[in-house]
Image (cartoon, grey):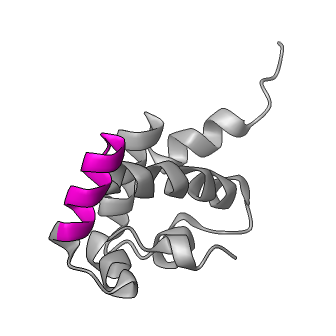
Amino acid sequence: MHVFLAERDVNYYAERLNVSSKYLSATIKRMTGHSVTSYIDRHTIPILKDYLNDERLSLTQIAEIMNFTTLSYFSRYCTKHLGQSPSEYRLSLQPKLDL
């Protein structure tokens, strides 16, 4: 499982690195030109897709595994980063029937 990247909070990573979130954010931005959250999201999205691809997991279970506080926040996050809701994403994975 992808337990470590279930966290999307900058403070979580700053604490583990023993630095302030402000310092971590400023350093990453200065060194790469990208925000810490963009890196977190970049690594979170493939994990999220893996979970959504697993039909054994309900959307509620995925939201819990990924530490989303509510199902609606999970849905908004997916819509922002996948361009569709979790349900729509799952529907898009279904094979198209030629009629």
In this rendering, does residue 34 appear at all? yes
Which residue is depicted at the point 33% across and 48% down? 31
Q: Nearer the viewer, residue 18 or 45?
A: 18
In the image, residue 57 lies in the stretch drawn in magenta: no
Q: Is residue 92 left or right of residue 8?
A: right
Answer above or below: position of 19 versus 35: below
Which residue is depicted at the point 47% across and 39% down? 82
Answer above or below: position of 52 versus 16: above
Where residue 38 appears, x then y in whole percent? Answer: 36, 48
User: Of all residues shown, which one is farthest toward the left?
Assistant: 22
Where residue 57 appears, x then y in whole percent? Answer: 66, 69
Where residue 26 appears, x then y in whole percent? Answer: 20, 58
User: Of all residues shown, which one is farthest toward the right?
Assistant: 98
In the image, residue 31 lies in the stretch drawn in magenta: yes
Q: Main secondary structure of the magenta part?
A: helix
Q: Nearer the viewer, residue 21 or 70?
A: 21
Q: Is residue 47 left or right of residue 16?
A: right
Q: Nearer the viewer, residue 84 or 81?
A: 81
**Quarter holding residue 18:** bottom left
Q: Is residue 57 left or right of residue 85?
A: right
Where residue 69 appears, x then y in whole percent? Answer: 31, 75
Quadrant of the rendering where the C terminus is positioned: top right
Which residue is depicted at the point 42% across and 58% down? 40
The residue range painted magenta reads 23-35
